[in-house]
Amino acid sequence: MKKTPAIALAALAALATSAIAADTASGPKKNVIDEVAWIVGDNAIYKSEIEDQYAQMRSQGISPGGDPYCVIPEQLAVEKLYLHQAKLDTIEAPLSQLSSGVDRHMNFFVSNLGSREKVEEYFRKPWNALRDEVLEKMKTNYIMEQVQSNLTKGVKATPNDVKKYYAKLPDDSIPFVPMQVEVQIVQLNPVIPKQEIEDVKARLRDYADRVNKGEMQFSTLAIMHSQDPGSAMKGGELGYANRTDYVPEFANVAFNLSDPKKVSRIVETEYGYHIIQLIDKRGDQVNVRHILLRPHVSDKDLRDATMRLDSLRKEIVAGKYAFDECVRYVSQDKDSRNNKGIMVNSNQESSLFGTTRFEMQDLPSEIAQRIESMEPGDMSEPFIMTDKKKNQEVAAIVRLHLRVPGHKANLSEDYNMLKHMYENHAKEQIIKDWVEKKIKDTYVHISEGWNNCEFRYEGWEKEQ
């Protein structure tokens, strides 16, 4: 029920290694547990750490981007610099907030490998040890992001900054922008029969009664019945979140719960119908469980919605109504109806995220199929598509508003992209300068055999 999808987490694979050697040159044997590769300030970086990171990369098919015995220790050394700065800035990772991410991560392992036992066998370590490693990695990543955010929070691009940046870009560094489109949509949700809604509410009331009477655990019912795929297998738990992370109807109830033993009233949101149970409150955050049920949409309901849109389309074609006008009064897509129906790119992996332009692969497949052969101004026939936010089938018609052919980026058509590039460049430079200053001010020793490298940052191989 969060407004934004949960962030996807990268898999962590770490295999424990140690080098134990016998020293026979000085009488009795003694164990040398590990080899120190680097020393950064008061922190040692061991060969086993580097081997662990390299094993992790290999397991994920990730290339280190160079000699792993140069790239990886430098990355670990930079982490030490960030962690030291975080102590000075009193930045701490919110363990309660991260714990839900760790649980998602561990559940991801189980869902891919089949069981806890198979996870332990694959990673060659006990469950709790692996969980601690995941948590430590997430803590480090969070802290580094916070330090970087503090360093770069003042970066704001002016039009003049972007213009100067673009003018200095070498011709072969100006990105090629693939063909893009702007699409208008009228979306109509099928009318759900009242009896279907009452049946859903009756089921939720039954679940709430069984929990309140102590007959069933809320989490068990969530696993068995909730239609929220993101939380069902976690017993409906959503993790710690702020009020603004949820849609208002859900937040208003979740943040007013006070008794963890009781279940909320039924809450209606755009996603369906919910019951909620409090787990914990910490400051401005709350952790709750929920069970989501959606009324069943029949084929007849979808056909009826499609027929209504077909009638509307004929009136638009006949000139009785303008498409923009129909959007305002008919469309039930709240993200676009107040903007003449123009869709916004919400694909976070896309460079166009947050704009009204789409590359074809970023559009829902049902829309892309219809837009591909259209000219600006053309309108589709009604069709059925899946609203991925609600995980529900809806009826829609779309109109191609704009098609921009593939081209080299320019200021007039691609200002937002170039602005984003400039800001990233400025932030990267600030971070690079900061890291190299930290290197200069920090004791660094690189052991023999680990220093024949071309490093990303300058200053590591200084006179001691």
Image (spheres, rainbow, N blue to C red):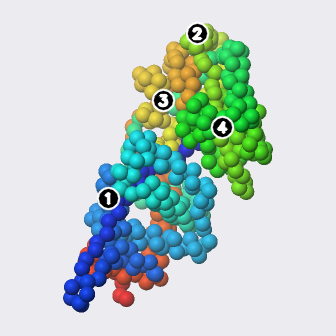
Quote the CA–CA distance across marks 2 and 4: 34 Å
For residue 153, side relative to residue 112 (left or right) = right
Q: Which residue corresponds to mark 4?
A: 218
Position of 266 with respect to 173 (left or right) is right
Q: Where is residue 388 in the image (x, y as percent from the top left)?
A: 54, 31
Which residue is at 67% across, 16% downward? 196
Q: Residue 55 carries which label?
A: 1
Please identify the quarter of the rendering in which residue 86 is found.
Answer: bottom right
Disc 3 or disc 1, which is closer to the eye? 1
Q: Residue 300 carries which label?
A: 2
The residue mark sitting in front, 2 or 3, is 2
Image spot of residue 28 (x, y percent): 25, 87
Q: In this view, does 242 lie above or below 182?
A: below
Rendering quarter of residue 77: bottom left
**Residue shown at 73%/57% (left/top)?**
283
Q: Is residue 200 above or below residue 275?
A: above
Q: Earlier in the sequence, mark 3 or mark 1?
A: 1
- Marks 2/3: CA–CA distance: 23 Å
Tell me how far mark 2 sits from mark 1, CA to CA. 54 Å
Closest to the observer, 413 or 387: 387
- Answer whether labels 2 and 1 touch (C-beta < 8 Å): no
